[in-house]
Amino acid sequence: MNTTSLPHSETRPAMTSPARALLKEHSMTLGYALLFVVLAFSVENFFSAANIVGLLLSVAQIGMVACTMMFCLASRDFDLSVGSTIAFAGVLGAIVLERTGSVGLAIAGGLGAGALIGAGNGVLIAYLRVNALIATLATMLMVRGLAFIASQGQAVGIADEGFISFGDTTLLGLPLPIWMTATCFLIFGVLLNHTVFGRNALAIGGNPEAARLAGVRVERLRVWIFLLQGVVTALAGLILSARITSGQPNAATGFELDVISACVLGGVSLQGGKARIFGVVIGVLIMGTVENVMNLLNVDAFYQYLVRGLILLAAVLLDQLKTRGERRA
Amino acid sequence: MASLQFDNISKVFPGVKALNGVSFEARPGQVMGLLGENGAGKSTLLKILGGQYRPDGGRLLIDGRERQFASAGDAIRAGVAIIHQELQYVSELTVAENVLLGRLPTRLGLVDHKAARRLVAAQLAAIGVDLDPAARLSDLSIAQRQMVEICKAVMQDARVIAFDEPTSSLSHRETEILFRLVKRLRAEGRTLIYISHRLEELYELCDACTIFRDGRRIVTHEAMAEVPRERLIADMVGRELQDIYDYRPREQGALRLQARGLRSDRLPEPLSFGVRGGEVLGFFGLVGAGRSELMRLLYGADARRGGEVLLDGAVVPARGPAEAIAAGIVLCPEDRKEQGILAHSSVAENINISCRRHGLAGGVFLRHGQEARRADEFIQKLRIKTPSREQEIRLLSGGNQQKVILARWLAEPGLKVLILDEPTRGIDVGAKNEIYRIIHDVAASGCCVIVISSELPEVLGIADRLIVMRDGRISGELARDQASETAALALALPDGITGAPAAPLH
C-alpha cells in the first residue's frame, strides 16, 4: 500500500478530468507519432516511400494475425500456435500447388487446415477445459511437427506465377499484403465494435460467468474466435509463402510472441475484457518501426532482441503506471 | 474517557463530499452501530479508521491521543482492526499462519510451527472459538474464516474493532456464533463499531448507534433500544417510509411456469413447483438449503439430471441460459459481483448485452444510437444513480448495480419469468423500496416473479406465496395469509422451531 502521496488517485479513479483521460487514452498513439517524427528527421533513409512500404510489408503478417489475437486475448485466452500454423499453411499450400497446379485448391487447403487447427484449439479450451496456454503450446508443437513431416524437412518451392502474384502485386503503389492487412484491421475493427460477436468476446473476457448468465453462448463463441484465428493465420502463412516463393517448415518461429507483444503494446489487456483495434494498429507499427530503424542503423541482430524486449517491458510498465490505483479501488 | 473519537472528520473525493464534518465518540465496552444508506459515508469513515484513506480535515483520536494513519499498518499498530466485508486472508495457509502472518515465531531462522499453533490455539480458546489452528483456510466456511480474522485482531491486541457487514454471507446459526463473540469482545472492554443494513441485527447487538446520510452525521442515539425502527429508517432515508415492501394485491392469472421433477447432483430429490402469471413467489430457507441451485437448474445454468421446465405449456430447452432467455426466463444472480455485472464495462453495455440481439441492423450490426437511448431510458426510469451511461458499472453502489441488472432484463421484449436471487443483499433501504416496486410492477404486467431471500421479513413482505426449502427439499408452502415468521422458520430450520432460537430474525 502506498504511504503518502496517492490518496486521491487511489480512491476515485474514474473522476479524472476529460483532458487527462484523453491523454491517457491516446498516450501510445502520441508516443508513436513523436517517435515517427524524430526518426524521420534523425535516421537517414527512414522517411522515404520505399522504406515506409518496406516497413509496412514487414509487419503485414503480424498485423493480420494481431487482429484475431486481439479477440483471443480480449476473451481472456491465449494462442501460441500461430507461428506453427503459418509454417504449416505455407507448406501445405505449396505441396497442394505442386501436386495439383491449382491455386484455388492450394489456398482452400491452407485455409481449411488453419480452420481445423483453430477449431481444434477452441474445442480443447472451451469444451474440454484445457488451459489455453497448455492447449496451444501442445498444438504449436504438433503443428510444427506436421509442417516438418509434410515437407520432409525441406522447403517446398513455388513456381506458379499466379500464386506468387499474391505476394508482389501492387495496387495504388502498395503491395497486396498491405492491403489485405488493412482490410483485416477494418473487418475486425467493425467486428469488435459494431457486432454482438465483438461485444460478447469482450464480455466473456471481462467476466465469463456473468456473460454466460446474461445469455452469451460462451463455449461456442470461444471456438469461433479460435477458428477465425486459424483461418487468418493460415492466410498470413499463404501470403508469406507467396512472398518467399516457397513453403518453409521452419518459417515464423517466435512469431506468436511478436503478435502478442504487438497486442500488448496496443493496450490489449491480458486479463481480458479490454481491446481497441486502433491500439493494435499502433502496437504493430511500433514493432515494425523499431525493427526497421535498427536495420537501417545496422544494429547487430543480437542487440535487436534486447531492444525489442526492453520496448515491450517499457510499454507494459507505462500501462501499469497509468492504471495504478485502479486495481485497488 | 472515550476510547475512539471522530472530531469534525471530512473527506472529499473529486466531485463528492464523502464525509462532511463528522463527529462522534464510542466508548470501551460499547457496540456502536453505524447506519445509513449506501454512499452515506460509513465505509469511507471505516477506511479512514483503518488507515486506508487520510481525512482531508478533522481529527481522529484514540484514547484521547490524536492519530494520523499513513497506512493500514499504522492503524494496526495503534490498536485498530477492521473486519472487512470481503475478508483478507491467504487461503492456502493454515489458521495459525494467517493469524500470525508477518510475525510468525521463528527458531534458528525457520518458522516454529509448533509454537505458532500453540499461541493461536490459546487465543482461539480465550475467545471461545472452536477451530483447529492447523486447518487450511480454504477448507473453512466463510464464518470460520471470519473467526480467524477476529482472532487475528485480538492477537494484535486491537482495542478498537470495526465490523463491516459481517453477517452478509453467514447463515442463521453462524450469525449467532458471531454475535456471541462480539458480545464477548464487548465484555472485555473493547470498543466496537458495527455496520449492517439489517436493523434486527443492530437492535440485538448495538448499545448505541450513529446515523449517516449524504456524508453527514444525522444523529447519535446513546440508547438504541429505545429508538423505534421507523425513526431510524426515516433518519436514514431522510423521509418517512411507511411500508417499505409496498405490497398491493394483484390479479393472478393462469399457471404459466411449471418446474417438474428438477434434480441434479447437488439436488438429488426431484423438485416441482408452479408460478401463476402476476404472482410473486417467494423462496425462503437457510443458506445452503438449495434455493439458488434450484433456480440455476431452472435457468439452465447448471446441468440437470432430470426433470423439465414448462412455460405456457411449452418445454423450455435445458441447454443453457441463452435458451432460457430466448424463452423469456431471466435470472438476477445472487453474487452480483461475480455473476451479474461485467465490472469493467459501462452501464450501457451492461444493460444492452442481452436485449441487443433483437435490434440489429441487417441482423448483424449494433445500433449504437438505439442502445444509448435504451440505456438512458432505463437510467431515468429505474432512477439509476450514475454520472453517465458510459460510467464503468463497478464504480456504482450495490443498489444501483442491481438496478442495472434489472434493467438488462426489463429491456427484454419477451420477458415472462423474472427470477431474483437475494435481490436486496447489501442494498440500502431506499433502493430496496424501489426494487420492491419494480418487482410489483413486473408481476402486475402478468409476468411470473420468483424471489429468493434469506431475509424473512422481506419475502413475507413482498410475496403472494412462499415456498420454504430445507436440505435440498421443498419442506412446505405457505399462502400469504398463512405465512408468518414462525411458520416459515419452523419449515426452514432442521429441527423445526423448537430446535433453535429465532432471535436474530425477529
Image (cartoon, coloured by chain):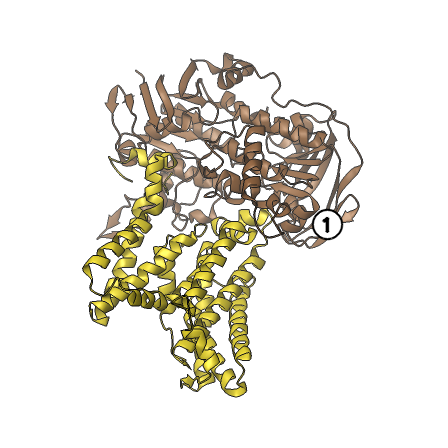
For this view, does B442 lie left or right of residue B60?
Answer: right
User: In the current view of this chain or complex, which residue is farthest to the top?
Assistant: B226
Q: Is residue B334 visible?
A: no
In the displayed structure, B301 sits above or below B73; it is: below
Which sits in the foreground, B231 or B484? B231
- Where residue B486 sits, quadrant-wise, is top right
Residue at coordinates 43% horizontally, 31% vertically from top-left? B164
Which sits in the foreground, B266 or A96? A96
Task: Residue type at mark 1: give it.
Answer: Val
Chain for colour yellow: A
Q: Quadrant of the N terminus of chain A?
A: top left
- Where residue A290 sits, quadrant-wise, is bottom left
Q: Which residue is mark 1?
A: B316
Q: How far across and down, in percent of the image, does residue B60 sit?
A: 29, 22
For mark 1, give the secondary structure.
loop
For this view, does A117 lie left or right of residue B42?
Answer: right
Which sits in the foreground, B358 or B141? B358
In the displayed structure, A260 sits above or below A13; it is: below
Q: Quadrant of the C terminus of chain A?
A: top left
Q: Is residue B103 visible?
A: yes
Q: How far across and down, in percent of the image, does residue B320 sit?
A: 64, 52
Q: How far across and down, in percent of the image, does residue B241 sit?
A: 58, 17
Residue at coordinates 51% horizontally, 37% vertically from top-left? B169
Local packing at callout 1 (Cα closer than 10 Å; few below 14, some 14-19, many 20+) is many
Residue at coordinates 33% horizontally, 37% vertically from top-left? A19
Q: How far across and down, in percent of the image, does residue B24 sit?
A: 36, 17
Chain for colour brown: B
User: In the current view of this chain or complex, which residue is farthest to the front?
Assistant: A172
